[in-house]
Image (cartoon, rainbow, N blue to C red):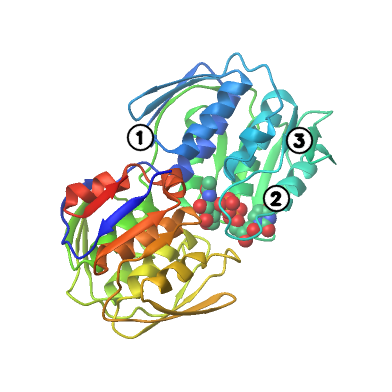
Amino acid sequence: MSKLFVTGRQKLSGEVCVQGAKNSALPILAATLLTNGENTIHNCPQLSDIEASVRILRYLGCDVRRCGKTLLVKSDDVDKYDIPDELMRKTRSSIVFLGAVLARTGKARLTFPGGCEIGPRPIDLHLKALRKMGVVIKEKHGFLECEAPKGLCGAKITLSFPSVGATEDIMIAACLANGTTTIINAAREPEICDLADFLSECGAQIYGAGEGVIIIDGVGRLDCTNHTIIPDRIVAATLMACAAVTGSSITLKGIVSNHIASTVPVFEDAGCTVKISRGNLKFSAPQQLESMKTIRTMPYPGFPTDAQAPLLAASCVARGTTVFVENIFENRYRHTTELVRMGANIHTEGKVAVIEGVSSLYGAKVQATDLRGAAALIVAGLCAEGVTEIGGIKYLERGYEGLELILSKLGANIKKI
Ligand code: UD1
């Protein structure tokens, strides 16, 4: 079981290329099931969540090869429509395979997805939408038995919440459906646009991705393409938080400024300077951070829930009080109990966390329990006095590609043992 040991208070400096977005790569890999020929997916990070999707694709009969950061996926020989429980449980996003397998084979048999423990993560919106598209779904002994007796049919679907996963699942299911599908109150995240770009390059007819209403006209077939995954906006926010708490200046390369438009002002409130030009982001932090205005997590283009944990860790050493309101997931403050062990002054109640900044954190033995919480503990360790020992590193590896190596190169004292 590996652990990270961080000796804090080292300044960071230098340049980093931000990895490809995990949350784009996962639905795009599922969507390759709909295509004929070999897809080339560039900038696909090496992460345990991606490997879990690759295992599902291979189980279903796809040929998947990795060449560095490029994945080659050929789905011509898909011969299964079930996904074993062991594979479904590895990630939450395995549920996007439901729409993809249905679109490909007209039926699907799988169990409920797994993923990080950040509160209840129902799939009712996915199931309701697919039922509207003509899928008969039976829940038996923990399995979802799904079949579209007349094939998938276009439908008008109104989401009660702009769920990212449900929007992706419906988009994938709709591409080869009979007729037109309209998604009202669709998620608008950049990863939705990346999925739409991939599918459109394959021949899908999708209009309005990135807006609240997406229209998909079903087509007869999809071909393969060559696609590059967008940069990961949450990794970018995490690296900014690392530089912020250490009073450092770093450059992030490969940034799309619109994607981080709601996180940058939070760092600016804290006294940091952010300049973006031609995909390069120059970040510079003061010696002491100021408290941030109240931060409310919201669907895109609001402040992302995934950036809450690393930013909250940074606020622990800011001068004054910062308030977070977590509106997306119910149980997303588990990292705070570990931050308190490091000397942070945090009170949480329901959706709200109140952080009174302290002059310094100190190293302690802490345990990550989810992906972004693990990143928060690294942020805290980087500015703490002494050594922080972080367990639960498997969570970090779900979404950050070699974060400890990147931080080491920037000058941090961080070792995986
Ligand atoms: C995706 C991201 C995750 C991010 C989240 C919100 C991936 C692989 N993961 O997760 O990193 O934190 O978006 O930006 O892209 N909900 C329901 N019923 C459903 C579906 C969702 O009630 O059928 C609720 C969830 O419980 C949650 C909220 O909707 O409270 C948001 O979930 P959703 O947008 O679906 O997140 P994911 O797609 O799981």
Looking at the rendered image, the disc whose residue lies closer to the viewer, 1 or 3, is 1
Q: Helix or strand or loop: what does disc 3 sit on?
A: loop
C-alpha distance separating marks 1 and 2: 29 Å
The x and y percentages for residue 159 are 68, 56
Residue 123 is labelled as 2
Which residue in the structure is indicated by mark 3? 153
41 is higher (above) or lower (below) than 26: above
Q: For the image shown, how many numbered marks are present on the structure? A: 3
Question: In the displayed structure, does residue 155 sit left or right of residue 251?
Answer: right
Residue at position x 53%, y 62% in the image: 299
Residue behind label 2 places its C-beta within 8 angstroms of ligand 1: yes
Using the rendered image of the protein, determine whether residue 254 is visible from the camera's viewpoint.
Answer: no
Residue at position x 78%, y 38% in the image: 144
Quick one: 306 or 150, which is closer to the camera?
Answer: 306
The x and y percentages for residue 155 are 74, 43
The x and y percentages for residue 304 are 46, 62
Q: Amino acid at mark 1?
A: Asn
C-alpha distance separating marks 2 and 3: 20 Å
Question: In the displayed structure, does residue 236 sit left or right of residue 385?
Answer: right
**Can you name the residue that lies furthest to the bottom here?**
320
